Amino acid sequence: MLTLKCNYHTWPFSAIAELIDNAYDPDVRAKQFWVDWTRIKGLDCLSFMDNGEGMTRARLYKMLSFGYSDKKAVKDHVPVGIYGNGFKSGSMRLGKDAIVFTKTRDSMSIGLLSQSYLQAVKAQQIMVPILTFRRDGQNLAEDAASLEAILTHSLFSTEKELFSELRAIGAAGPTGTRIIVWKLRTTLSGETEFDFAADKYDIHIRASGSERSRERRAMSPESDWSLRVSAHAWRCLSDCNLGPGGGGGFVCTS
């Protein structure tokens, strides 16, 4: 089922737009959203972070589950991903695996949505390991199995590494959410479909080396292959301005 989700988006930037739209939803209340490229343990990764209200364990579970949504309009602000599939379809289009770190004022939670994990354990149904650290110390005993699964099948093999990613959210604010996607989709030549080296403050869709491809690129609008230009087009509908971010990406401020 996870493999089917990645077929919802043929254009990779539309998958990124899904994740930006999730942060814009009224129940998240994010003021800023960061998109970056990073390398973790030798792998190219896309990271997404917002300074919204974060998610409780229950909300994180619902976001990672299939076919569920409890998004509600706040005043006149109607949520974009009303069917609740935006995160799944967006993240799985970009890469095989994604991990979510989220902080509220009362808890910190981590969830793993991973095709590699499901294949490794030969899962017969979708399984999403989730663990929560509560400020009052009342953690769930059943989280031990989830912790083991996350340390074994994610990019992070120690609790120290997990807490480091949770602390990274603090750079944006006291609460928020950080998503890391890895095992990114590649071209036929084995390169990632994104070109992270072309522009320090942008992410480009990679052009193939053929002369015909280069000619098509020259004739196409910049929004077809520049994430920065595309994001301007999406977010201008919501009065959002873009400015340079760190690590080869940008920050969107509403």
Image (tube, grey):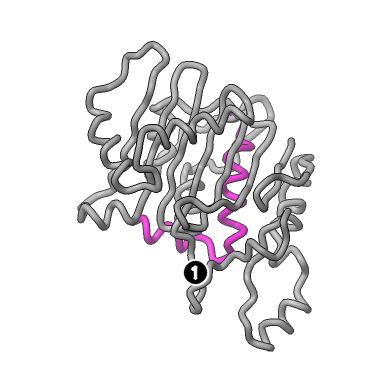
Residue at 58% across, 30% down: 28
Residue at the extreme top of the image, as rendered: 136
User: Which percent across, then down, holds residue 17?
Assistant: 62, 51
- Residue 254 lies, with reference to residue 219, above or below; the image says above
Residue 143 versus residue 151: which sits nearer the camera?
A: 151
Residue at 37% across, 26% down: 132
- Residue type highlighted by circle 1: Thr
Residue 2 versus residue 130: which sits nearer the camera?
A: 130
User: Which percent across, then down, holds residue 11?
Assistant: 58, 65
Q: Which residue is labeled 1 in the image?
A: 186
Residue at the extreme bottom of the image, as rendered: 211
SS category of the residue bearing label 1: loop
User: Which percent across, then down, holds residue 156?
Assistant: 39, 43
Which quadrant does the N terminus fall into? bottom left
* Local crowd size for mark 1, using a 10 Å CA cut-off: few (<14), some (14–19), many (≥20): some
Q: Which residues are magenta?
A: 1-27
Residue at 53% across, 34% down: 177
Does the magenta segment cover residue 198?
A: no
Which quadrant does the C terminus fall into? top right
170 to the left or right of 132: right
Residue at 62% across, 59% down: 13
- Residue 127 lies, with reference to residue 71, above or below; the image says below
Residue 182 versus residue 84: which sits nearer the camera?
A: 182
Dominant secondary structure of the residues highlighted in magenta in the image: helix
User: Which percent across, then down, holds residue 79?
Assistant: 59, 37
- Residue 45 lies, with reference to residue 191, above or below; the image says above
Does the magenta segment cover residue 17?
A: yes
